[in-house]
Image: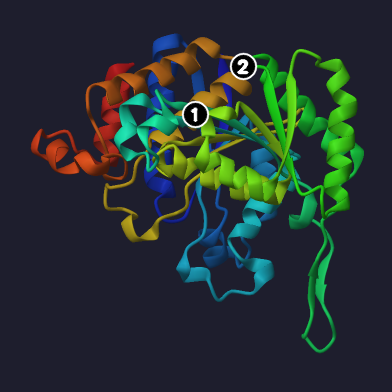
Amino acid sequence: MEKKIALIPGDGIGPDIIKQGVRVLDAVAKKCGHVFNYETVLAGGCAIDKFDNPLPKESLDTCLAADSVLLGAVGGPKWDDVPSNKRPEKALLGLRAGMKVFANLRPAVMFKQLSAACPLKDEIVGEGLDILIVRELTGGIYFGDRGRNADNTEAFDTERYNVSEIERILKIGFESAMKRQKKMCVVDKANILESSRLWREVANKMHKDYPEVVLDFLYVDNAAMQLVRNPRQFDVIATSNMFGDILSDEASQVTGSIGMLASASLGDGTGPGLYEPIHGSAPDIAGKNLANPLATILSCAMMLRFDFKMEKEALMIEKAVDTVLDEGWRTGDIAGSDIDAIKAAGKLVGTDKMGDLVINAL
């Protein structure tokens, strides 16, 4: 099978980790008889530097013409002072809107081998965590009306949702729950926000089509507390754009390292998905062979699973990552309190070596 993949290395460590993702994809392709062709495009801060535009039209067009898109990371302090309409993060919003990828799937998984990196007590996390956060991605307050008054003394941002936007997210949430533990929690702020009350109404109506799923609701402040107090109570969390942004970052820290978590942004299946690690650009370690590429490599597995329907190949990558962790190899961010012992054992590695290890495990 031949597929075209658009690559957006972006800024900071983005090029470092994308390189390893491509190496792993090529190893899978060679092993399984596929051909992956790549086209690299600019987006984020690097695009601002070259084109004075975080997402040039040519970059978006290339992504739309691809079978799938792999993104590294965008942004950094270098562009903190650019006008708000040209910030690197605008590339992300533009990609999501332009590609019509409305659902972000973020698995928050605590690998059993990395329990030492988890900040929670053993009796709280038990033998591990496996939570799927389904975040609405192209609506809500991030895309609502915004502005300031004439004398710049007042600002506003509007949270707005319609029924169809909510339905398509909750459909993914319910169907994901049916393949997991059959539990879904909708997180909102229905005691205050009218938009959240609409989320609850739609969820209760749709629940009739998924009677096997246990449906619960939590206010976002309580959900944030429960993720720390008892994260094992959650299976699938479905929520709005802003709440999902916050809770998925919290969940990443609960699992031990943001450097291990992948994500998939999906649409209706008629166009490419957008795959990326959930961490930032970490410009302080860019080019130093220190970044953890495993979240990007696991994002590649999600790409194979969702866009290319290559379940066997996706499992190969995930099993290879598991094998590498079982053998005790660690980058600095996932070494936890054992870092001195890992270093003494010669198991502390950099970006390139971690890529080598995953490829060898394949």
Left or right: 99 as drawn, with respect to 290: right
Please give left or right for residue 183 compared with residue 232 in the image: right
Q: Is residue 131 above or below residue 317?
A: below
Q: Could you tell which of marks 1 and 2 lies nearer the N-terminus?
A: 2
- Mark 1 touching mark 2, by CB under 8 A? no
Q: Indicate the quadrant containing the N terminus: top left, top right, bottom left or bottom right.
A: top right
Name the residue nearer the viewer: 273 or 109.
109
Residue labelled with disc 2:
180
Q: Residue at x 77, y 85 (%)?
A: 152
- Residue position marked by numbered label 1 in the rendering: 300
The C terminus, quarter of image: top left
For badge 2, the amino acid type reads Arg
Residue at 27 percent of width and 47 percent of height: 289
In-image side of 206 versus 305 (left or right): right
Q: Which mark is residue 96?
A: none
Mark 1: give few (<14), some (14-19) or many (20+) Cα within 10 Å: many
